[in-house]
Image (spheres, rainbow, N blue to C red):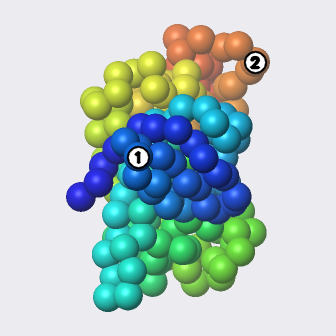
Amino acid sequence: MIGWISGKLLRKQPPQLLVEVGGVGYELEAPMTAFYNLPDPGGMVSLHTHLVIRDDAHLLFGFTDLRQRDLFRTLLKITGVGPRVALAILSGLTADDLVACISVGDVAQLTRVPGIGRKTAERLVIELRDRLDATAESAATLTGSSALTPEQDAVSALVALGYKSTAATAAVRAAASAGASVEELIRGALKELSGERT
């Protein structure tokens, strides 16, 4: 399995990339959200990768951060979601947007992604909820809490306190304000949650 490559970006033409590593050019496909973080051709790139082996081809997919690659792998475990559909989902939604959609069950947002119908969107919400929580915890362990936004840190803290992920996400969103710290978000979210309980 090829899990990481680092080299010179020779070409980027969505969704395809060509990266030279040690004199060898690797062709990869990447979600549109990854293209925003890439330098111009000639620049150096480091990408987390996932290799899909089929009878007729070996397909290499590249991602600018580990969380995005892990979400791609999680999506591939869902019935009816192959590499192309997973790539489309991560092209239409950032990792944060996808996690938020799943957490609050936003089927309408998921169906805006080309190739995702209502039934597939509903299946994604049902099957991904627990898996995404596990993926987020794994990513935090591997990359440190700095990889998470203040909102994600606040949600994680509330989940650790025993609140459901859906309720915690909604409360943090309601309490969110520009530049708010994790502590401020948690305090605001706890007020929201206690207000709901009474």
Asked if residue 192 can be seen in this view, the reply is yes
Mark number displayed over residue 184: none
- The number of numbered badges drawn on the structure is 2
Question: Residue placed at 31% from the left, 75% from the top?
Answer: 53
The N terminus is located in which quarter? bottom left
**Residue placed most toward the observer, 79 or 45:** 45
Instruction: Work out whether mark 1 precedes mark 2 in sequence or the reverse, and give the earlier one.
Output: 1
Question: Residue placed at 63% from the left, 36% from the top?
Answer: 42
Secondary structure under badge 2? loop
Mark number displayed over residue 23: 1
Q: Where is residue 9 shown, x and y percent of the image? A: 57, 42
Q: Nearer the viewer, mark 1 or mark 2?
A: 1
The C terminus is located in which quarter? top right
Q: Where is residue 135 shown, x and y percent of the image? A: 35, 47
Q: Is residue 177 left or right of residue 46?
A: right
Secondary structure under badge 1? loop
**Residue placed most toward the observer, 170 or 3:** 3
Image height of 126 relative to 155, above or below: below
Mark number displayed over residue 178: 2
